[in-house]
Amino acid sequence: MQFNGYDYKVSAAGRVNLIGEHVDYCGGKVLPAALSMRNTVYIRPNGTDKINLSWTDLPDKIELDVNRLGEYRHLKHAKYQAGSLYLWQQAGHKIVGCDMLHDCTVPFGSGLSSSAAIEVSTIAAMATAAGEKPDSVEIALVAQKAEREYAGVNCGIMDQYVSANGKKDCAILLDCKTLEREYVPVRLGDCEIVIANCNKPHNLVESKYNERRAEVESALEILKTKTEISCLADLTVEDFEKYGAALHGKIKDRARHVVEECDRVRRAVKAMRSGKTEEFGKLLAASHASLRDLYEVTGKELDSLAGAANAHEACLGSRMTGAGFGGCTVSLVKKEGVEDFKKFVAARYESETGYKPTFYEAELSDGIIREGV
């Protein structure tokens, strides 16, 4: 594939969430990191009112009309690009006719936010081609709006935020209610992060993600009658023990997960800063158990993959990462045991599920990167 002839190369990162799952849309703090797996857009203005989309791994070539960007929700491979550009246009930014080539190394359906990487890089590339230098936080907010209003996924802000604002060798402690952020250097001593894909096909739009959103919103409305909170993340564990009796059944389980997961994020950051990798690993395993038993977003494959990981002596802790119902696990593994860990997990997982996992070697990276071609 030839990339010469384009004026700019603009990319945005996929992400792994280390801990803090399904709390971003509840106003909680999360601890994601941007990955070196990215969506890269090669772009050149073409002097027309048409945006010509192409891909390095697809034969499709799609033409979008700059004046009709709101009309492409039906397109399978281009709706994220069209939606991002449409919402960027609606926010008052300049859209120019251009040729846009997408090259994505974030595995689709992996839970590593290929959609956010596509949305953020599309907007950043268009802004670059149009001569704008927008704030990366604004790009993230518009990208999130595109996924919610155009693609139909009622997502929180985490994925787009870290895709746009990631920092090399750091995680972001992001307060999803205020968008305050703090970069946390990822120092894991004799351990490293191993990401494994369960390779079970899943589609976030068709999953139970929106159902979980509705359940925690119901819990919030009930709890608001008992205590002055604006989001579930405002509750401490002690608060929940006091007021949680107003909730029942699955609604109570969902809310308990959110409250306790927020507490795990706080403890995980403290453990990472103090070099207590074993404590950090235990919190990863506890997070997965909560997502399995209380939030019910794991499923057989992710439970098998995390279970195999947690059974290996070199693993300090493993959990699902992303929305669930398929996708990836993130594990904290001692460096000298990584290769044996991969062999052990792959053999056990395949025997239990029939799927072969894929392991990824990815560094923690910056978010948006702009370059000339």
Image (tube, rainbow, N blue to C red):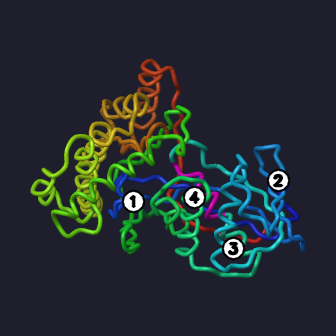
What's the mark number on residue 89? 3
Residue neighbourhood size for the residue with mark 1, other residues' Cα within 10 Å, grouped as few (<14), some (14–19), many (≥20): many
Q: Are marks 3 and 1 in contact (CB under 8 Å)?
A: no
Q: Are marks 4 and 3 in contact (CB under 8 Å)?
A: no
**In the displayed structure image, the side of residue 53 where residue 213 appears, left or right:** left
Residue in front for this viewpoint, 284 or 187: 284
Pick whichever of labels 2 and 1 is earlier in the sequence: 1
Q: Are marks 2 and 4 in contact (CB under 8 Å)?
A: no
Magenta segment: 112-121
Give me the residue at 36% from left, 45% from top.
Answer: 332
- As measured in the structure, the alpha-carbon distance from the residue carrying label 2 to the one carrying label 3 is 19 Å
Question: Dot 1 corresponds to which residue?
Answer: 25
Pick whichever of labels 2 and 4 is earlier in the sequence: 2
Q: Position of residue 185 (x, y in %)?
A: 39, 65
Question: Dot 4 corresponds to which residue?
Answer: 147
Q: Are marks 2 and 3 in contact (CB under 8 Å)?
A: no
Q: Are marks 2 and 1 in contact (CB under 8 Å)?
A: no
**In the displayed structure image, the side of residue 356 where residue 234 appears, left or right:** left
Above or below, comparing residue 176 to residue 249 in the picture? below
Q: Amino acid at mark 1?
A: Tyr
Q: Quadrant of residue 96?
A: bottom right
Pick whichever of labels 3 and 1 is earlier in the sequence: 1
Pick whichever of labels 4 and 1 is earlier in the sequence: 1
Residue in front for this viewpoint, 50 or 184: 50
Q: Position of residue 292 (x, y in %)?
A: 32, 37
Give me the residue at 36% from left, 33% from top.
Answer: 309
Question: Dot 2 corresponds to which residue?
Answer: 62
Residue neighbourhood size for the residue with mark 4, other residues' Cα within 10 Å, grouped as few (<14), some (14–19), many (≥20): many
The question of residue 341 being in magenta is answered with: no
- As measured in the structure, the alpha-carbon distance from the residue carrying label 3 to the one carrying label 1 is 25 Å
In the current view of this chain or complex, which residue is farthest to the left? 242
Q: Amino acid at mark 2?
A: Ile
